[in-house]
Image (cartoon, rainbow, N blue to C red):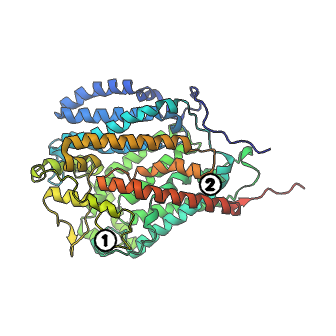
Amino acid sequence: MAQTPRRNLPLTSPPSATDRLRQLLGPADRLLHPLTALAVATLLWIPLAALTGRWVAMAWCGWSLVLLATALWLERPWINRLPLPPLTVITLAGFQRWGLGAFLLAQAGERVNSDVLPWSRALEPSQALWGVVSTAIVGVALLNRPLLRRQDPAPLSGAVRRRLPLLVLLLALYSVGYLLVGVISGTLDRSNANYIHWTVRLWRADTLFVPFLRLRDLFPLLVPLGIQVCAGPWPVEAGEARPRRWLAPALALLLLVSLVLGGLTGGRGLLLGPLLMLLLGLWMTSLPPRMIRWLVVGFLVFALPFIPLMGSLRTTAAFQSTVSQRPLERLELIARSAVNARPKPETLAVIGRDLFPSSDPYLFETPGSEQPPAGWKRLHGLLFLWVPKHLYPNRPEINDGHLIAKEIMGKPELGTVDGKHVWFPNMSFGGDLYWRFRKPGVVIGALLFAALYAAFCRVWYRWASLSGSLLAYLIALYPATFLNGLPLRSVSETVWNWLWEFPKYLLILVVLAWVVDRLHPLLLRSPRPSP
């Protein structure tokens, strides 16, 4: 008789042998309680603030850490199975920006170049915009605590395990195909010649790939588990038929190809983003958490210098003279630049600005600080929310973060070629609310979004599963894509994310699960008959 898959069961205190979060953090695991995190953040705040002279900025940095600890504490039952449940991922994305990024900006002190100066001068009010929104999200999410205390998500079921290799293979083919088209055609290239050529066009070589971009994040997230399922021991409860072993090296090769292609473009996110998702994907494998801890350290050692190195390299004449269509030449240049790189005094501030990239600081600089509240400006474009731009090219701009950023800079035509925008700065949700409605708008808008996001989390806690159908498993993984594609940007972009992108991806996941359910036996190896 078929076994009934284990559902979300009442939660008892997990033993340390199965509490992966405790194994990862060691003694620091005690900091995950909100009150303990608050006490430690307060103790660290005093010396750090005295050292930098930025008392308010350091207070916000400490508070971002408290909010992250609270999110981890709330979603701990899920985190022992999945790396990025919904509250944790959105809080972690905020911590990266107004916590870690702002901390590096404050530590840089006076060692700031002119490009970073607005972020340094207006650091505290910019943090406040993010801080109010993040506090509202975590605060309202506490209402889900009774539900989470009753949950103990079951491990990966045999049914999902049998379908996983085909799922990862399809995601791999999509990701490599997207990157291959981007490198060969130049749509993803960061050299000005290719970048401007394609950015001003409505129809691009990769247009058919773009509507499914969040699937690209799921590939590196799932590939470690996919390789383990194909190459590792096969549990009895998963059934007799198991995936073909050649899939393990095939998936590893496709991952390597995707990383090389991403590095060739010169885009930092196309390399660091997949590496980060790959690292998080290891959390779902049997790899010991202590080893993952060292891999996290290794990633930070690589990523923190790489961010300013690639950012400065892309502006050089040597880089602009190369194109992604000549990969060996591009790789040689990147390798030579990495070997010859030398730390600069302003590097710390540049890293901080790149981690905290929204243009909110210009709200508190002239002329942005002197502009009247924008109110409902351009929000009428949401009437065209469900009208694809490729069918109606003159549709009002809905993804308008770059337009707002340039307006508060007082340079609405900055970064345009033939009247078309080729430079896309962004605004945070809190920054746009402040631009439109000032402080009351930030508070009211933050509470409204927090209530909606808490409702989304509650539905996710009930429907997501690692032991049910493949669709429930894909729903469980979907919030992980928020780390690189935060669904919380300008007001218009946020509405677009939840009323257009979210239903679209729900339909995509339904179709993807249906396809895998039908075709997965093709990649299973039947057991040999007994002699």
Give x and y (percent) for residue 252: 56, 58
Residue 258 placement, left or right of 92: right
Image quadrant holding the C terminus, namely bottom right
Residue 341 placement, left or right of 507: left
Say if mark 1 contacts mark 2, CB within 8 Å.
no
Count of marks, rendered view: 2
Residue 148 placement, left or right of 60: right
Disc 2 target residue: 164
SS label for mark 1: helix
Q: Is residue 254 visible?
A: yes
Residue 199 placement, left or right of 157: left
Q: Amino acid at mark 1?
A: Thr
Closer to us: 298 or 362: 362
* Among the 4 quarters of the image, the one containing residue 401: bottom left
Q: Residue at horizontal 60%, vertical 57%?
A: 513
Give x and y (percent) for residue 157: 66, 45
Disc 1 target residue: 199
Give x and y (percent) for residue 134: 33, 39
Dot label at residue 159: none
Q: Amino acid at mark 2?
A: Leu
Q: Residue at horizontal 37%, vertical 75%?
A: 203
Image quadrant holding the N terminus, namely top right
